[in-house]
Image: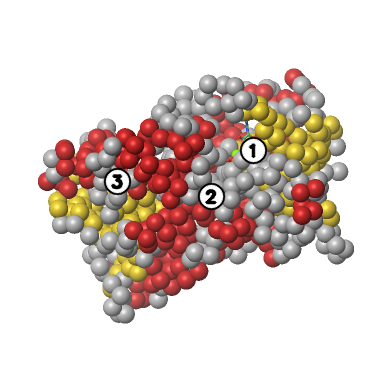
């Protein structure tokens, strides 16, 4: 189990540290995919990167809570243990396939380096394993590819190489932060199929960070919806798609062009996500919510609404019953 | 008379050769592309990465020189116009780019970025009149006039894209060429920008050449669509007709590749149709991936063929259309 417990984070600013993530709890079991969705700037990446304690290097402060991987507290680990964790039991795939690869080293050098960091193998064994990993993500002629440089590959090929690298330490969990956002539809479809196949075959637990409900529909078992540093709704993927409870989730799902009526204005959400430190007192979504009332001016308990169907579906909104 | 008409546009680039040079070859980025755009309408170009969409847009804007072909603006051949003549025609067509971070000069205040075109196209305006015009287009794009005195880094991605659109609109063009204008934005900001574009089109009678690889977005905005593959237009027609009944197998594949709308439909993407990344060098470029390919496809010249009667304005470049 990969568990984020009551995590709160603050980001640096000229006005001092500002709260950016507050009291977030999530868990990802092996063999399951949790989709973490929300608009840009909601705190998704901040939350996800904390699993590997990557925020520390950017001055991001943990003000509360912790992260456990199979019961082990990540914040109690020393540097060597952390290095083994990163790319070992837990690995990450990022959005930008170009910046995540070093342009001056060959694909082969980069992937064998990761393998040797995590597995006790000879040079030749590492090379053989690299070739088989590249083949397993659908790249043909892996030996030739290993002599090539990142700049010679297409975006889709680079993303496959990154996924192969993420798999190289034989992880149990994978954190994928917008893994297909930079890719075109046809490549996106293939990367989604690849991620699904790998995840099933190896029984990986996956934390999938995205603002794309299509990707969530394709891959996730559970969904957590994030807004202004908070989880505002969570539940099994079918429940979220069939009966979104929080007005934010509903509004986000409604403005997808794929479900809209062609030629009519999209039901856009007015305004934008408040920046860290600019959150309203009560419900954080209230200023943009079409259904906000006086009850929304007071702070809302996390699970203000829980589904009567016992699926574990809940929402941080006091008006769900009234609105449905 | 069409607002814009292009015919036989082609462009190749030298490419490849790896890090150490050598082995360079030519990539035919765009081949024999033609289309027309009428006043007030939206033509979308869709296609996968590398299919030649941006190269086409940049030739239309005369930012790069075509190897062959012709570009007509309001009935006038502008293919070889240069200098002052070209600058004057540019007033009619403006471009909006994909990346709202890279496309605004970080050291320039918004007033200057948005007002840049006015200096060229409306030199008669003094500073005050220019500021007024900038305030007006910013407000038209849903931004406060006070944004003028700030710098790009003080704005979110969606706000920057609004500024990019305001910059393009400042000179009152007839045509906006939008190259993936919402691809870098999240779904809610994307909806705001798409609505803004629709509203501006209604109010100003603007025409759009809208480039995207997202078919759901395209369906929202376009009147007609041109599907590109390997530098050629392989299918074109009214958007709803093409969606309802694609004729080219590549169009079908693109439609199938869209992510599911609901988890119950997951895993039905176009894996089979799009499994291979190959592009054939001769004959139909799609035949290596095409489930309907037959022997004669190897000899196909790639030309668009009008569909049967009653389907005017539809065409597909396929010997065995669906
Ligand atoms: N290193 C940092 N220093 C200061 N502020 C930061 C830092 N990292 C993130 N933030 C701020 O914290 C908020 C949440 O950022 P985060 O990157 O987690 O958003 P996100 O939900 O991943 O959005 P996106 O979809 O755009 O990736 C944003 O307002 C962002 O500007
Ligand atoms: N300046 C250039 N020099 C060399 N090759 C180029 C240049 N510009 C484009 N190309 C090549 O031309 C082809 C078409 O590129 P283009 O940018 O037009 O594609 P696109 O359809 O816009 O793709 P994307 O969706 O990735 O933006 C590609 O093979 C590309 O590598
Ligand atoms: Mg992020
Ligand atoms: Mg492009």
Query: Callout 3 environment at 10 Å: few (<14), some (14 to 19), or many (20+)?
Result: many
Q: Chain of mark 1?
A: B
Q: Are marks 2 and 1 on the same chain?
A: no
Camera-side mark, 1 or 3? 3
Seen in the image, is A95 located left or right of residue A125?
A: right
Q: Residue at x 30, y 50 (%)?
A: A170
- On screen, residue B246 versus residue A57, left or right, reads right
- Residue, disc 3: A169
Q: What label does residue A187 carry, if any?
A: 2
Q: Single out the residue that lies furthest toward the top.
A: B83
Give the answer, above or below, for where A260 lies relative to A94.
below
Colour mapping used in the image: secondary structure
Which-is-in-front pick, marks 2 and 1? 2
- Which residue appears at 21% of the width and 42% of the height? A84
Tell me which residue sits at (53%, 21%) in the image. B20
Element under label 3?
loop
- Answer with the quadrant where ligand 1 appears in the image: top left
């Amino acid at each position: 189990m990969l568990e984020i417990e009551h995590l709160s984070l603050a980001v640096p600013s000229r006005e001092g540290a500002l709260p950016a993530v507050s009291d977030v709890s999530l868990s990802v079991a092996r063999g399951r995919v949790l989709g973490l969705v929300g608009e840009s700037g909601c705190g998704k990446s901040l939350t996800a990167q904390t699993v590997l304690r990557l925020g520390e290097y950017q001055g991001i402060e943990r003000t509360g809570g912790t992260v456990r991987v199979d019961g082990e507290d990540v914040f109690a680990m020393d540097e060597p243990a952390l290095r083994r964790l990163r790319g070992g039991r837990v690995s990450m795939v990022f959005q930008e396939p170009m910046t995540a690869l070093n342009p001056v080293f060959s694909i082969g050098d980069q992937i064998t380096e990761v393998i040797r960091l995590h597995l006790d193998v000879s040079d030749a064994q590492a090379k053989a394993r690299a070739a088989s990993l590249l083949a397993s993500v659908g790249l043909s002629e892996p030996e030739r590819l290993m002599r090539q440089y990142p700049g010679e590959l297409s975006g889709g090929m680079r993303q496959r190489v990154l996924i192969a690298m993420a798999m190289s330490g034989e992880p149990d969990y994978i954190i994928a932060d917008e893994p297909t956002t930079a890719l075109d539809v046809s490549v996106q479809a293939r990367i989604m199929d690849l991620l699904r196949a790998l995840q099933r075959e190896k029984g990986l637990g996956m934390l999938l960070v995205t603002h794309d409900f299509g990707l969530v529909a394709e891959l996730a078992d559970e969904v957590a919806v994030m807004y202004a540093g908070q989880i505002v709704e969570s539940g099994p993927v079918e429940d979220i798609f069939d009966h979104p409870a929080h007005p934010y989730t509903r509004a986000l799902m409604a403005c997808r062009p794929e479900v809209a009526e062609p030629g009519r204005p999209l039901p856009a959400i007015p305004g934008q996500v408040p920046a860290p430190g600019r959150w309203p007192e009560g419900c954080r979504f209230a200023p943009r919510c079409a259904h906000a009332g006086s009850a929304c001016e007071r702070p809302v308990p996390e699970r203000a609404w829980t589904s009567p169907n016992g699926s574990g579906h809940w929402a941080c909104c006091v008006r769900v019953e009234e609105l449905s | 008379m069409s607002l814009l008409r292009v015919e036989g546009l082609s462009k190749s680039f030298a490419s490849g050769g790896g890090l150490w040079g050598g082995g360079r070859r030519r990539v035919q980025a765009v081949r024999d592309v033609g289309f027309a755009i009428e006043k007030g309408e939206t033509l979308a170009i869709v296609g996968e990465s590398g299919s030649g969409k941006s190269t086409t847009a940049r030739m239309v804007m005369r930012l790069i020189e075509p190897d062959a072909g012709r570009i007509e603006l309001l009935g006038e051949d502008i293919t070889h116009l240069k200098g002052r003549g070209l600058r004057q025609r540019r007033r009619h067509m403006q471009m909006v780019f994909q990346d709202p971070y890279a496309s605004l000069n970080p050291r320039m205040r918004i007033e200057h970025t948005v007002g840049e075109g006015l200096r060229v196209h409306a030199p008669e305006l003094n500073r005050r009149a220019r500021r007024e015009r900038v305030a007006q287009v910013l407000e038209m794009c849903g931004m406060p006039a006070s944004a003028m005195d700030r710098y790009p880094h003080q704005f979110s991605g969606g706000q920057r894209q609004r500024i990019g659109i305001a910059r393009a609109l400042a000179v009152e063009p007839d045509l906006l060429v939008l190259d993936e204008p919402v691809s870098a934005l999240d779904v809610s900001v994307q909806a705001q920008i798409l609505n803004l574009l629709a509203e501006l089109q209604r109010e100003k009678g603007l025409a759009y050449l809208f480039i995207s690889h997202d078919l759901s977005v395209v369906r929202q905005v376009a009147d007609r669509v041109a599907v590109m593959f390997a530098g050629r237009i392989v299918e074109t027609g009214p958007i709803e007709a093409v969606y309802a009944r694609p004729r080219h197998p590549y169009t079908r594949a693109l439609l199938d590749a869209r992510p599911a709308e609901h988890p119950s439909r997951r895993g039905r993407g176009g894996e089979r149709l799009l499994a291979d990344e190959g592009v054939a060098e001769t004959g139909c470029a799609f035949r290596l991936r095409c489930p309907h390919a037959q022997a004669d496809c190897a000899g196909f010249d790639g030309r668009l063929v009008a569909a049967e009667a009653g389907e005017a304005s539809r065409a597909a470049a396929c010997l065995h259309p669906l």
